[in-house]
Image (spheres, rainbow, N blue to C red):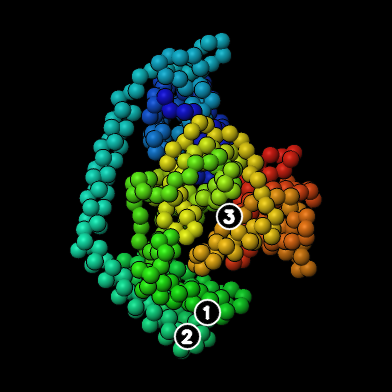
Amino acid sequence: MSDRWEREQVLGLAPDAASAKAAGGVARPAKWGATGCDGEAVWGECRGSGSSVYRTCADLTEPAFRCSCPSRKFPCKHALGLLLLWSEGRVDAGGAPGGAGGRPAVDEGPRPGWAAEWLEERRARADKAAERRAASAAKARDPRTVERRERRVDDGLAELDQWLRDQVAHGLAQAEKAPYRMWDDAARRLVDAQAGALAGQVRGCAAITRQPGWPGLLLAEYALLRLLVRAHRRRDELPAGLRGTVRSRVGFTVPQEEVLAEGERARDLWCVTGARDTAQDLLTTRRVWLLGRRTGRPALVLSFAAPGTSLDASLVVGTEVDAELAFYPGSPPLRALVAERHGAAAAARPAGTSVRGFLDGHAAAIADDPWLDRWPAVLAGVRLARGERGELFASDPSGDALPLRLGDPWRLLALSGGGPVTLAGEWGPRGLRPLAAWHDDEGTVVL
C-alpha cells in the first residue's frame, strides 16, 4: 500500500485556488461510490448533478489523473476530492474499515476494468518511453555523436562570442530601441547549435532594456555570457565541479539515471523551505528548496510539467523528511534528486541564519559559480521595516537588512504583526523574494 499523502500534498496538486476550494466540497463520502485503492492507484465514481456519474482515477506513482468530467482543469476537483478522501483514510483496500464505528466510509472493491485499462495503457506508454530514452542515451554516448555535438556547440559559442563583441563595439545605446528579434535571432542560432540553456539566457537579455539602469545591467549580462563562452572553451582545464556547472549552463544535461548511480549522496533531515512555479514555453517548472538540518546544506529539487500533466507535490513546504539526496555535478553541487526516503515527512521549522551569515554563504557560492542567479535564504528573527522610499526590508537583530521583492506585502505584514519571523525565500539581483514564513503563533505560512 502506498503511504497516504498529507492534505497539503494533495492540495499542492491543484492548478489554482478555486480548484482547491472546490475539491473540499467534493471530498464527501456521500458523493462517491465504487471506490477503492491499492499500492499504485485510487479510483471511484463521483455523483454529479442529475444522473451524471464521473469516473475518476489517480495513478499514485506519477502522479497522474483521469476523470470523465468535462473540466479542462488538470487535475479536476473530482480527482482532488478523491485524493483528499484517500489521504484521510476514507478510501480503503480489501474492505478494511475506514469510517466511524468500524464501517467503511465508502464502498470498496477491486480495481474496475476502466481504471485497470487506463493504468495498463499508462504503463505500456511508460515502458516505450523508457526504451526511447535508453536508445537516445545510448546514441548520446556514442563517441561520434559526442564529438559531433561538441563541435556544433563550439561553433555556436564562437559565433556568440563574435556577436557579443559586436554589441559592445557598436555601443549599447542601440539596444534600448532594438527589436526583440535581435536577441531572439542569436538565441535561435544557439538552439541550432544544441546550446539550449545558453539560448534562454541570451533571450532574457531583451527584457533588461526595460529596467532602470539597464545599460550597466546589460553590460554585466554580456560579460557573464562571454565569461561562460571562455570557460567552456577552456573546460578541460577546469576543476570537475566547475566544469559540470559550465556544461549545465551551456545546455548539456545529465540523465537522472546517471545522477542516481554516480552522483554525490547526502543523507540528512531535509526541511522544505520554499517552492515556486514558473511557466515558459508551455512548460511549468517547480523549484523546491531544501535545507539540511544537520549539515546546513541547501539543495534544489526541480520538477517539470507539460500541459495536461501535474508537478511533483511530494515535498510540502513546512515539512521535514529524512532522505538521501543524489546531487548533480556542479560547483557548488545544488540541484539534487530524492534518491531514497526514510520514513514519512513531519511538520518542521527550519533553522535560519543572520543576514550577515546568509551574505557570507552567498558570496562563497558566487565565488564558485559566478553565473548563479538565485540562492536560497532562511533568515531567523527578522522584522519587516520600511525604507525611505517605502520599500520593504527584512532586518535582523543586528540591524543588517535585505531588500524584499514581492508584489503584495500585506499577508507577510499581517503574519509578522511587527514581531520577528523566520523568513525563507530566493535571493536574486533584485532582492529577496519571500516564499514562506514561520511565526510562533501561526506556524508555516506559504507566501
Q: x, y (%) of residue 301?
A: 48, 49
Image quarter where the N terminus lies is top left
What crowding class fits label 2: few (fewer than 14 Cα within 10 Å), some (14-19), or many (20 or more)?
few
Corner quadrant of residue 443: top right
Q: CA distance from mark 3 to mark 2?
A: 33 Å
Q: x, y (%) of residue 219?
A: 52, 79
Is disc 2 in contact with disc 1, using a CB cutoff of under 8 Å? yes
Marks 3, 2: nearer the viewer:
3
Q: Residue at 22%, 56% (x, y): give it.
A: 139
Q: x, y (%) of residue 338?
A: 45, 43
Q: Which residue is mark 3?
A: 376
Q: Residue furthest bottom?
A: 170
Q: Amino acid at mark 3?
A: Pro
Q: Amino acid at mark 1?
A: Leu
Label annotation for residue 219: 1
Corner quadrant of residue 56: top left
What crowding class fits label 3: few (fewer than 14 Cα within 10 Å), some (14-19), or many (20 or more)?
many
